[in-house]
Image (cartoon, grey):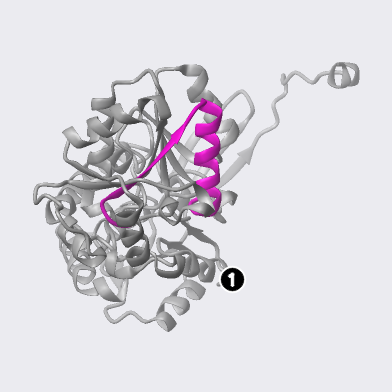
Amino acid sequence: MGRVDSKIAKCKNKSKSTWWRMKDQKSRGIIERDEVNGIMKVAKPIGVVGCVTATTNPVINPMHNSMCALKCGNAVIICPHPRAKGVGVRAVELMNEALDKLGMPKNLIQIIKEPTMELSAGLMKTVDLCICTGGPGLVKVAYSSGKPALGVGQGNVQVLVDRDVDYDEVAKMVIAGRTFDNGVLCTCEQNVICPKDKVDEMVAALRANGAYYIDNQADADKVRNSAFPDGVFNKEWTGTTIQQMADLAGLEGIPEDTKVLVCCTKGYARQEVLAKEKLFPMLALFTYDTWEECMEIARANLEMEGMGHSVVIHSNNTEHIEAVPTVVNVSRYAVNQVGGTALGGAMDNGLNPTTTLGCGTWGNNAISENLWFTHLMNVSRISYKVPDMYIPTDEEIWAD
């Protein structure tokens, strides 16, 4: 599923950015000396890390998880999605060939060649820690395994568009993110929320950059009924091309060179099924009068699906940008960036490169950040008494 060029770009860019960020970082033994507080931190391997990987990222999931695990001295067992076991096995073979050339111990990276639900559950119960990158049901199983687990929440990236931005630039970024790998990434832009008085400008910019706007509810209903029959996502739509989408929905007259479909809406959140995560290159368009209303639409859409994951904010108004986290509870807010390629960490932002995006307790996850090698180590602390440490009086401690 998805696009070959996007798969190649993901493999190249994620491996490069991961290595660049972890290169020369201390990950075993003494990693920090805090002379002021008399604390010395000592990093130790966890042991065997199990990785249940997703069908949407069957190569970069094992690759990134293995890089992070080996960085901390762990061994890895991969359990691929059954639909992607072939490419998963080949990826592990290539990594092991590279490890052999470096003289590393055998079998540091292993893979279950014929994965089943039973084997996946067994892996979760056996390893020292499990990384689970899959659907909510699978993540719940991982958290119920009795062993420590790091899982992900569901994506549904909302795009909040302010009045003070270049709408042509916004359209280019949104379309780039929405079309990357035919929209199967959890970081891909999903819903554009723009001012009512700027909607014509927004639509014109999207059209100028390759979008086809479905501006009538009759055609929108065709999409709703096919992609979300009875409100449930139709997996046949996953990673589809524009023409495949048109055929599935019975849409006519979609130009061959269309990059993305943009669909009108009727309400938001539970009033509009297209407010959900769409694993295909389509954007739903919502409008607002005030920035407060814009944030509320994003919050409500995420409350229905995607709590804790990510949003993209296109704005040059610092007050507006910093108001969003007070209303919308997600773990990542990308400002004036392409969500599809930035939220998982990029060379030009400070987010750790990852394929496992924690969503905090909002998304029923243990972490609210991008999974990194620092999550795959145990850290012991040696505490020394500090003779000259300042100790305040009771009056100072309890003073107003």
Count of numbered circles on the image: 1
The residue indicated by pointer 1 is: 146
- The quadrant holding residue 160 is top left
Q: Which residues are magenta?
A: 279-308
> Where 65 sits versus 195, above or below?
below
Seen at 42% across and 29% down, the residue is 196
Of residue 208 and residue 3, the one placed in the foreground of this image is 208
* Residue 120, image x, y percentages: 42, 76
Label 1: state its secondary structure. loop
- The quadrant holding residue 116 is bottom left
Answer few, some or many: residues within 10 Å of disc 1's Cα (few below 14, many 20 plus, some between 14 and 19): few
Seen at 24% across and 60% down, the residue is 239
Residue 295 drawn in magenta: yes
- The quadrant holding residue 112 is bottom left
| Residue 330 visible in the displayed image | no
Label 1 sits on what residue type? Gly
